[in-house]
Amino acid sequence: MSENDEELTWQSRRIAKSVQMVSSVDLSDNDELLSKLLEVQKVFEMDAEFLQFIALVAVFPPKRNIIKNWKKNQGLFLKLVKKTGKVGKDHFL
């Protein structure tokens, strides 16, 4: 059984690997981050609902303050919210 056949949960190895893959790119480049997120979604066969979680964990690890860096990455999260069919940042926040 492959990793992608296992049930996907917040604690899955697929999620951990996705976070590692996304956090390996330039965290200030929202387009590159979005591209990597869409790539891991396809590779690990996951729903869009997991992308926001992966992005949040990957882009804001403990050493990168979310409050100080939010403005740099806000556009990424708005694009993810729109991708899931919800409009506006209020749905994410």
Image (spheres, rainbow, N blue to C red):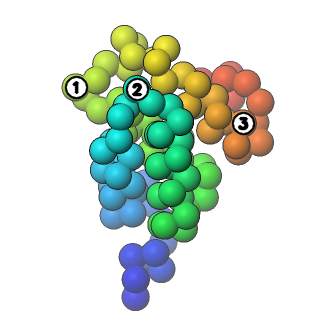
Q: Quadrant of residue 91?
A: top right
Q: Are marks 2 and 1 in contact (CB under 8 Å)?
A: no
Q: Nearer the viewer, mark 3 or mark 2?
A: 2
Q: Position of residue 33 (x, y in %)?
A: 47, 40
Q: Amino acid at mark 3?
A: Lys
Establish if 24 lies above or below 78.
below
The structure residue drawn at horizontal position 37% and vertical position 11%, both measured from the top left corner, is: 68
Count the labels in the image: 3
Q: Position of residue 90 (x, y in %)?
A: 68, 22
Residue occupied by mark 2: 28
Question: Is residue 85 rendered to the left or right of residue 59?
Answer: right
Residue occupied by mark 3: 82
Establish if 43 lies above or below 41.
below
Q: What mark, if any, has residue 63 been given in the picture?
A: 1
Sequence order check: which comes first, mark 3 or mark 1? 1
The structure residue drawn at horizontal position 40% and vertical position 83%, both measured from the top left corner, is: 2
Cα gap from disc 3 to disc 2, whole angstroms: 20 Å
For mark 3, give the secondary structure: helix
Q: Quadrant of residue 54?
A: top left
Sequence order check: which comes first, mark 3 or mark 2? 2
Q: Position of residue 7 (x, y in %)?
A: 48, 72
Q: Amino acid at mark 1?
A: Lys
Q: Amino acid at mark 2?
A: Ser
Q: Position of residue 55 (x, y in %)?
A: 46, 40
Name of the residue lying farthest toward the left: 63
Question: Is residue 32 rendered to the left or right of residue 84?
Answer: left
Q: Quadrant of residue 86?
A: top right
Q: Residues within 10 Å of mark 1 (few under 14, many from 20)?
A: few
Q: Are marks 3 and 2 in contact (CB under 8 Å)?
A: no
Question: Is residue 18 rendered to the left or right of residue 62?
Answer: right
Establish if 40 lies above or below 22.
below
Q: Nearer the viewer, mark 2 or mark 1?
A: 2
